[in-house]
């Protein structure tokens, strides 16, 4: 049996008051559509299609930025969820069974979709809708049952007062028999309160209907407004922090801590307040991260200490200490035992084992050996205004305070630069380079010259 997935992402989401399509609104800094695509990828459908519409080019650009084989189908005018599914007719006809998902309901998971498929197959259903009971059903489609048998989905706007009291709602996720869905779609009309083609009306054109009721009410939650989006963020934030606690991660307080859905953290690591960890970041065991760190797409080893650090697309090996107040920009690799102190910025550079840059240093586009010491205020001048060049520093070199290394330049192993030097030529191994003006001291200058002028 071949399975397809159609993700509805064409709506404008007017209630969000945004210049972007609603499905790109983010929960924990990942677009809602990204959550749904991750779930679909995790399930392993034979085909995944996303229906785009409002500002389709933005949704398409996001999809293109991700890995995976995903087709997009354009819905030119937003005439409702039923019309959106019609736009993916080709994908439907290529599969036996399709799962339709809402692009604005990020918490649906692959286990639920799998369990619903088992129910769908077992009952020989033509449609199986995934439902849940929720405390505040307002806004969702209600599940109408006749003597317990699922018969229809009624949209909020079309509910009678009695129907509005029903707390079992439509998640917006369904399994359909592909052939039956293609037969039902042309029968939809706009004869309803919204004047739209409702996908939910397909149910009534099918004979064998099933409802798979999930015990987890979160799977239905969607966001049509900023308030709802904030609620989704709050739920996801707490759930993820609790998951890490279950895995042995410590939190003294969770204030201001935001951890993205794909972050991995080892046991006995502590995350301190106001720390944001996002993207595909992996953190090892026994680390102390925070307070006040922002980390994106980093790979961090065991026993690392980060204090007030910003780190992006960097590799930090075990026993490294960074901070307070340091920035690691993309392409930074800190090998074991490196120490980076306050007001240091590293960019696109590899720093060898046990090298130290304690204070006020900029290292950009550099290959630095082991055991190097950067004195306070030393910098690499990697940019001449047009091009960028690399600086190479050998093992155990000593870079004196306030040294300017004008790239391209090489400092040999165990070489030293005198404090205040501006180094423009390569320095051989074991040499000391001094680049300063001769000291001139004018005796009694204050008395003889300055006072006379006054
Ligand atoms: C829909 C369901 C409702 C369910 C709820 C769950 C219908 C008619 N109603 O309502 O029963 O409880 O989801 O969240 O399906 N979209 C398009 N093209 C369109 C319209 C919408 O692609 O023309 C997309 C939207 O981008 C969105 C999804 O379809 O991702 C759902 O649309 P939305 O308008 O949010 O439906 P709800 O009113 O939430
Ligand atoms: Ca919605």
Image: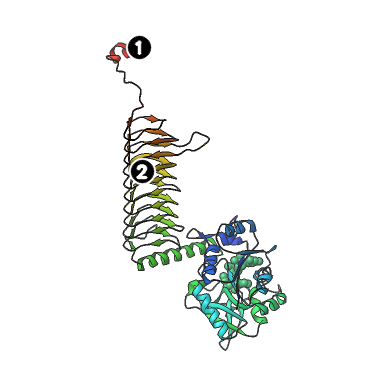
Spatial separation of the CA atoms under disc 1 and disc 2: 53 Å
Tell me the element at label 1.
Answer: helix
Quarter of the displayed picture in which ligand 1 can be seen: bottom right
**Residue 58 in sight:** yes
Q: Earlier in the sequence, mark 1 or mark 2?
A: 2
Front: mark 1 or 2: 2
In percent of width and height, residue 218 lies at: 48, 71
Q: What residue occupies the far front of the structure in this picture?
A: 429
Q: Is residue 449 above or below residue 39?
A: above
Mark 2 element type = loop
Q: Is residue 299 above or below residue 91?
A: above
Colour treatment of the image: rainbow
Does the numbered disc 1 mark a residue whose Cβ is under 8 Å from ligand 1?
Answer: no
Q: Are marks 1 and 2 in contact (CB under 8 Å)?
A: no
The number of discs equals 2
Q: Nearer the viewer, residue 140 or 413?
A: 413
Left/right placement of residue 315 relative to residue 176 reads: left
Side of 199 relative to 419 (left or right): right
Q: Which residue is mark 2?
A: 369
Residue at the (27%, 14%) spot, across then down: 444
CA neighbours of label 1 inside 10 A, class few (<14), some (14 to 19), many (20+): few
Question: Where 251 falls versus 362 (above or below)?
Answer: below
Q: Position of residue 354 (x, y in %)?
A: 31, 47
Quadrant housing residue 207: bottom right
Q: Nearer the viewer, residue 27 or 86?
A: 86
The quarter holding residue 48 reads: bottom right
Looking at the rendered structure, which numbered label has been put on residue 453? 1
Classed neighbour count for the residue bearing mark 2: other residues with Cα under 10 Å, few (<14), some (14–19), many (≥20): many
């Amino acid at each position: 049996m071949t399975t397809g997935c159609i993700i509805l992402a064409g709506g404008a989401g007017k209630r969000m008051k945004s210049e972007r399509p609603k499905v790109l609104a983010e929960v924990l800094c990942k677009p809602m559509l990204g959550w749904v695509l991750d779930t679909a990828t995790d399930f392993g459908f034979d085909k995944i299609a996303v229906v785009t519409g409002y500002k389709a080019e933005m949704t398409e650009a996001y999809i293109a930025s991700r890995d995976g084989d995903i087709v997009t189908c354009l819905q030119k005018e937003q005439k409702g969820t039923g019309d959106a599914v019609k736009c993916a007719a080709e994908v439907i006809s290529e599969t036996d069974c399709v799962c339709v998902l809402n692009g604005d309901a990020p918490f649906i998971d692959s286990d639920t979709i799998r369990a619903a498929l088992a129910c769908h197959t077992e009952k020989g259903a033509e449609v199986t809708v995934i439902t849940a009971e929720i405390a505040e059903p307002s806004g969702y489609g209600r599940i109408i049952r006749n003597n317990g048998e699922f018969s229809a989905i009624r949209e909020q706007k079309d509910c009678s007062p009695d129907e509005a009291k029903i707390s079992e709602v439509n998640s917006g996720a369904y399994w359909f028999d592909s052939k039956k869905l293609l037969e039902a779609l042309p029968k939809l009309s706009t004869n309803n309160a919204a004047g739209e083609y409702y996908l939910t009306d397909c149910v009534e054109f099918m004979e064998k209907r099933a409802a798979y009721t999930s015990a987890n009410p979160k799977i239905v939650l969607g966001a049509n407004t900023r308030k709802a989006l904030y609620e989704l963020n709050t739920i996801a934030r707490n759930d993820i922090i609790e998951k890490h606690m279950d895995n042995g991660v410590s939190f003294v307080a969770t204030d201001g801590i935001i951890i993205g859905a794909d972050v991995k953290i080892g046991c006995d690591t502590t995350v301190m307040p106001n720390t944001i960890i996002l993207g595909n970041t992996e953190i090892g065991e026994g680390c102390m991260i925070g307070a006040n760190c922002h980390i994106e797409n980093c790979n961090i080893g065991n026993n690392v200490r980060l204090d007030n650090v910003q780190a992006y697309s960097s590799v930090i090996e075990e026993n490294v200490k960074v901070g307070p107040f340091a920035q690691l920009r993309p392409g930074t690799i800190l090998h074991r035992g490196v120490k980076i102190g306050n007001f240091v910025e590293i960019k696109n550079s590899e720093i060898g084992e046990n090298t130290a840059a304690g204070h006020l240093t900029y290292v950009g586009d550099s290959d630095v050996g082991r055991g190097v010491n950067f004195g306070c205020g030393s910098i690499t001048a990697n940019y001449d205004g047009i091009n960028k060049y690399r600086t190479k520093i050998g093992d155990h070199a000593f870079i004196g305070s306030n040294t300017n290394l004008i790239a391209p330049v090489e400092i040999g192993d165990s070489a030293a630069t005198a404090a205040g030097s501006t180094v423009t030529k390569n320095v051989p191994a074991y040499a000391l380079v001094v680049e300063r003006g001769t000291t001139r001291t004018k005796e009694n200058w204050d008395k003889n010259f300055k006072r006379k002028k006054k």
